[in-house]
């Protein structure tokens, strides 16, 4: 049970088990040092860091909830759904995540092939050097290698020129369907949350359909205050939460001290009239 007291929550961040640079123990330590008292590690399609994260969080006196960020294909684009307070031993969840990880490996090889055609040899092996988990090679790992090799000046430049949707080395992922991802989260007893909605390039009509469909499928929350949103978007998605009756979540989306726009625990609090997502945790 989450205690009823004043705390700072950060319910979206990443470790070296997916595409972050710090180990789960190091992320927990940094979160605690920054004043976080309610924390979740939400690695991409992987729960292998949860045990170490929980152990360190509890040793430091933080309240911890198990989390995951699942890659979904919706309306022909990638959507991320966070699952919070999940049972990491759940069979359906683990089998679903294993399927996504297999597809991730195939995608990584395809991206490396496209980059080679563009004149950048050895990117698969180079990206592996940045991956704490070789089964979860992602665009972020390729971008880090491309910057190290001085092919681009920044990770954002790598995405803008080569790896973002529609760019020459982009490869669409074979992700979960929305109903599958929510089914896995619900099977594991978790709460499903749409991650950083302000990042998606959906039309107004597509967003309306997404929010209605997500709620009909049992989705409960939406990230309002997140490191991937601008301050104006905090207000925009607070209004979405009010309109659809979503629980409100918050998280830095921290990946690295050098790369992340917002550090762990560095966000303002949620608007006081919204119902925070932790009210749904048992």
Image (cartoon, rainbow, N blue to C red):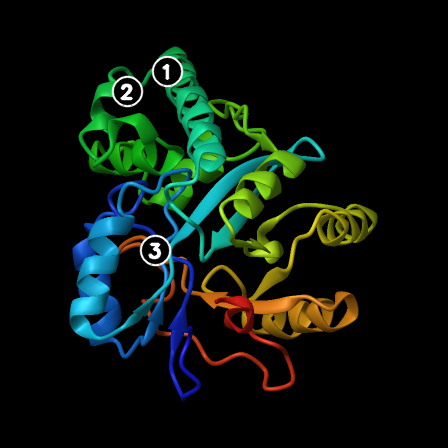
The disc, 3 or 1, on the residue closer to the chain's N-terminal end is: 3
57 on left or right of 193: left
Residue 154 locus on image (x, y percent): 33, 45
Residue name at image x 61 percent, y 57 percent? 198
Q: Which element carries disc 1, helix, strand or loop?
A: helix
Which residue position holds label 3?
41
Q: Which element carries disc 3, helix, strand or loop?
A: loop
Which residue position holds label 1?
109
The disc, 2 or 1, on the residue closer to the chain's N-terminal end is: 1
Position of 127 relative to 255 (above/below) = above
For marks 3 and 1, give the CA distance.
Answer: 27 Å
Instruction: Give the quadrant of residue 134.
Output: top left
Q: Which element carries disc 2, helix, strand or loop?
A: helix
Question: Mark 1 Cα within 10 Å, few/some/many (few <14, many 20+)?
Answer: some
Which residue position holds label 2?
124
Residue name at image x 36 percent, y 56 percent? 13
Residue 184 locus on image (x, y percent): 54, 39
Position of 100 relative to 234 (above/below) = above
């Amino acid at each position: 049970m989450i205690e009823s007291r004043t705390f700072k929550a950060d319910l979206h961040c990443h470790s070296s088990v997916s595409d972050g640079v710090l180990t789960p123990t190091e992320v927990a330590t940094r979160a605690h040092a920054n004043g976080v008292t309610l924390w979740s590690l939400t690695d991409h399609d992987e729960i292998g860091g949860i045990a170490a994260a929980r152990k360190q969080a509890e040793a430091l006196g933080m309240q911890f909830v198990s989390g995951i960020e699942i890659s979904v294909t919706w309306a022909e684009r990638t959507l991320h759904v966070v699952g919070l307070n999940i049972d990491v031993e759940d069979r359906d969840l683990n089998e679903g995540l294993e399927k996504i990880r297999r597809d991730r490996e195939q995608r990584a090889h395809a991206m490396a092939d496209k980059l080679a055609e563009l004149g950048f040899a050895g990117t698969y092996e180079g990206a592996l050097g940045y991956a704490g988990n070789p089964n979860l090679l992602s665009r972020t790992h390729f971008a880090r290698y491309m910057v190290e090799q001085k092919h681009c000046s920044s990770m954002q430049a790598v995405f803008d020129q080569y790896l973002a949707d529609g760019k020459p080395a982009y490869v669409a992922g074979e992700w979960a369907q929305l109903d599958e991802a929510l089914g896995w989260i619900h099977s594991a007893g978790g709460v499903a949350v749409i991650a950083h909605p302000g990042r998606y390039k959906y039309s107004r009509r597509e967003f309306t359909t997404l929010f209605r469909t997500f709620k009909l499928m049992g989705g409960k929350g939406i990230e309002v205050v997140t490191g991937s949103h601008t301050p104006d978007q905090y207000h925009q998605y607070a209004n979405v939460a009010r309109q659809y009756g979503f629980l409100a979540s918050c998280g830095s989306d921290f990946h690295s001290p050098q790369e992340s726009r917002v550090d762990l625990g560095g966000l303002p609090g949620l608007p006081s009239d919204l119902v925070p997502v932790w009210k749904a945790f048992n």
